[in-house]
Image (cartoon, helix red, strand yellow):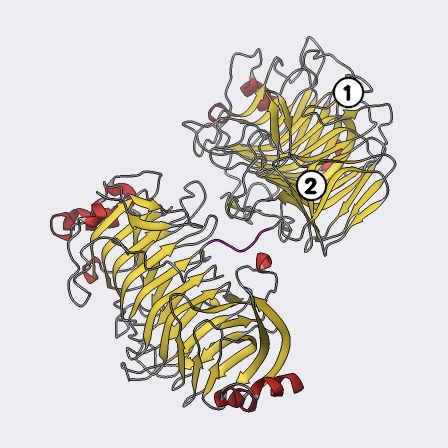
Amino acid sequence: MNRLLLKISGVALATMFLAAGCGSDSGDDIIIGDTQREEIVVTGDLAEDTTWTADNVYLLKGRVSVPSGVTLTIEPGTEIRGSKEPLGWLQVQRGGKLMAVGTVTQPIVFTSSVTDETKRQRGDWGGVVLLGNASNNVGTDVELEGNGGTFGGSDDSDSSGTLEYVRIEYAGWELSPDNELNGLTLGSVGSGTTLSHVQVHFGLDDGIEWFGGSVNGDHLVVSGVADDCFDTDLGYSGIVQWAVCIQAAGQGDNGIEASNNADNFAAAPVAFPKFANYTFIGRGEYGSGKGNGIRFKEGGKGTATNGVVMNFVDGAVDFDEVDVAGFDIRNTLFFGNKAAGNATIAQVRGAEEQAYFENTAATYGNSFTDDPQLNSIDPEDPNLLPKPGSPALDCAAPAAPFDTSAAYCGAFKDQDWMAGWTKFSPTEDPVAGAVAVQGDIDSNTTWTADNTYLLVGRVSVKAPATLTIEPGTTILGTKEPLGWLQVERGAKLMAVGTATQPIVFTSSLPEGKRQRGDWGGVVILGKGINNVGTDVQLEGNGGTHGGSDNADNSGELKYVRIEYAGWELSPDNELNGLTLGSVGSGTRLSYVQVHYGLDDGIEWFGGKLVADHLLVTGVGDDCFDTDMGVDLRVQYAVCLQDKGFGDNGIEASNQDPDANAAPRAYPKFANFTFVGRGEYASGKGNGLKYKEGTRGLAVNGIVMNFVDSAIDMDDYATGGTNAADGSTVTLSNLIFYGNRTTNAANATDNIKDDTDNTDEVAFVNSSTAPSFVDPKLASVSFASPDLMPASDSPAVDGSCGADATTFGFSDAASYCGAIKADNWLSGWTTFEQN
């Protein structure tokens, strides 16, 4: 305490009250910009009026409360940080006040306590909660979600203070489902409170949520939050003018979600939020994203006027359990919702919404055809001012009670009121502090989880060295020069993670900017047998593989994720996510995901290997690819294609140009779930593709939603045998559904019989126990898949599935598909697009 007492002696008397009134202590000195500030730890309740000054940084440890009768004043330029353990957050109780008044050049910032700004993320701390005495439609002593305290009363003019030029970053916390802390939570806050120029950035849940009350707001910004930008509930009836919602890639739901009361849609007072001059920009991920620009539900009413709503995935507007006569949406430009560049009334969610806008078209002035022509909607560097000539500048003025001088659509006309005090770019720079690795590793080396490693160019593990990677370690690959990891013949990679601490190979770009082909991938080369030679040059300039030892050991990969990899050096000369050249059976491959790769997910060139629990998601070509005489056995495998990408679930070849080359490739897959992209009009790909003389075995599998065919076989006769070379394919206990066309449920609809000298339909019908029924999986959505079958699914009800041990596999697993009751995908996998 000595350092704190010395510090207090030179500051205002109000800071002494901080030391006397609640738990506090001094921490380390912190450098912000060029200024050294002392960290003051704050816990518990403030006992008296208190001022936090800009020459300190304040750390909230646990809940810090401003009780009734107490005012907390925060000076411009002050930074307040919240801890994650214990969860730090600020609560202003009924009758308490928060006077947080910053300036455009000195905003007050609530942020994460993570010292390294590049490591801050959503949910690092709790957020800010204001509780008031205004009315709501539940009661006068309502417990706020997130254990946030009690709110409610009858004084709609109640004042909880002022927030002006305030930024709240990296907050939010889910205590349990539907029980969260938001960035800024307002419970029955009255109209005597001032809320102006406030930003919530990169929050874990909603940006700003109102539970009842009547507080007004202006110049509000919510950016990059994981749920709704604005959320109104429990009879909220305030006015908001000049509001921005801008979603980040991979995150966000609705621009505004306006509800009345989930338990009683007619509860009074009925919620009636009023928004004017708003600009809502969705995430634009039409293939797998979600969210609506404006959503009214559960009896909510409201006004939304003079707005711009763009790029929301589900729709511009959604009505759910509401009376359309209860709200007024007018003078708003809708563009690019539901599909890129969409300029039709079909931007709204469905028929009910379309009827509303058709019925009000003559008087309400909404447009579904005009691009608002904003300068930039980049979520990391937005310039939302309309360009000269934009239709946003030609809108009627909003009516009272709004400021009627704002005769334009959207939050801006010619002045960017966000300039100077807001923040948009995520601070995370994954390369910052990383250990750069280049060239050869020629002695035993361990990479530890307390470091991040950056592959700069090709990094080769040379024989006889072993590279060991600890659980939880992250390895980044550069794009220029192309970074990738190669394990040469005689060397080993021991990468053994856990379900809670997977080892992750990923892009060196920040989250939100990552994409397929950001780096090279992982290549393992062995001394096993292939059908080309003992010194084979791997495609992608990946090194030399081959030999005569099919029991060769290249190490172990377990609970490993490889993301955003792959590189095309030239046509048919690529690096895949994971490339295995003549790898022997001494190598162990288990619980491995390749995600969003540019080329194939996992490709085997010769060798002999047993693997299990493999997952490939969203790759640009085949999920699994086998070549050059590989002898492979895989049990429990998932292929999940993303819209717009992907070819075959498995592409099995022997050798090109010699289909008879020995040893003949023999990939064997059991208990697999392959889900295609389902774009029947324009996509491509087969679930199972056998070609160029390969043998094959597929047992206990599900193949669904592939565009070209469930199965394609080149130059195989009925019965699965190629008369020219003796290769044989065996199918047993497979479910084919929804291939070639939605809900396809027979052999002819699921399978394309093309001109390749093979009658695939006859072959499948002659195989053991084929089924053409819906496997009833919980969800095959790429963004949030749940491949668990329902209890009455034919995949698990005994009608499909053989004892896989009779085919040489380790587990009996007498069901169809990769998953039965234990979802082995949980905890260590990802489905994020960038």
- Residue type marked 2: Leu
Observer able to see residue 133: yes
User: Front-most of 91 and 199?
Assistant: 199
Task: Give the residue at x 16% y 57%.
Answer: 397
- Counting from the top left corner in percent of width and height, residue 344 is at 25, 39
Q: Is residue 516 left or right of residue 371?
A: right
Observer able to see residue 817: no
Task: Give the residue at x 69% y 23%.
Answer: 539
Task: Give the residue at x 56% y 36%.
Answer: 516
- In this rendering, the answer to whether 331 lies above or below 130 is above
**Residue that label 2 marks:** 455
Mark before the other along the chain sequence, 1 or 2: 2
**Residue that label 1 marks:** 536
- Counting from the top left corner in percent of width and height, residue 256 is at 34, 59
- Marker disc for residue 679: none
- Residue type marked 1: Val
User: Front-most of 324 and 817?
Assistant: 324
- Residue 534 magenta-drawn? no
Magenta stretch?
A: 425-429
Q: Residue lying furthest left in this view?
A: 362
User: Front-most of 42 and 29?
Assistant: 29
Q: SS of the residue at dot 1?
A: strand
Quarter containing the N terminus = bottom right
- Counting from the top left corner in percent of width and height, residue 815 is at 64, 41
Q: SS of the residue at dot 2?
A: strand
Q: Is residue 337 left or right of residue 811?
A: left
